[in-house]
Image (spheres, helix red, strand yellow):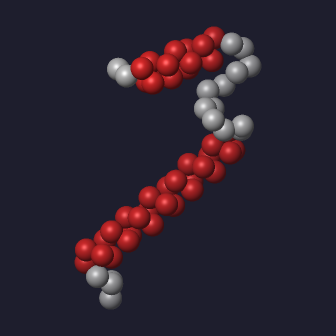
Amino acid sequence: MSTTERKKSVARLKTKDKPGMSNKGKYASVEEASLAKMEAAKEFIANLDMALFKKNGPIE
């Protein structure tokens, strides 16, 4: 386990101990985290489509 991973896991444990705190990471709200996840998924699909297009050519 790297130092960064260790720090993140310790931070998660500390967050769980405090009442009223949730483990949302760098986002201000659950909705914001959800939107970021959706955007990441859209970007992933777009990259996958482009890779397949470059490999196989246009779909007819």
Question: Residue at image x 66%, y 25%?
Answer: 22
Quarter-wise, where is residue 46 in the image?
bottom left
Q: Position of residue 27 (x, y in %)?
A: 66, 38
Q: How many marks?
A: 0
In the shown orientation, is residue 22 left or right of residue 2? right
Looking at the image, the residue that sits furthest to the front is: 3
Question: Residue at image x 32%, y 88%?
Answer: 60
Question: Residue at image x 60%, y 13%?
Answer: 14
In the shown orientation, is residue 47 left or right of residue 59? right
- Judge whether 20 appears above or below 43 on screen: above
- Judge whether 22 appears above or below 40 on screen: above
Compare residues 8 and 52 and report the one nearer the observer: 8
Quarter-wise, where is residue 55 in the image?
bottom left
Looking at the image, the residue that sits furthest to the bottom is: 60
- Judge whether 25 appears above or below 9 on screen: below
In the shown orientation, is residue 38 left or right of residue 29? left
Looking at the image, the residue that sits furthest to the top is: 17
Q: Position of residue 21 (x, y in %)?
A: 70, 21
Quarter-wise, where is residue 32 in the image?
top right
Question: Residue at image x 72%, y 37%?
Answer: 28
Q: Position of residue 59 (x, y in %)?
A: 33, 83
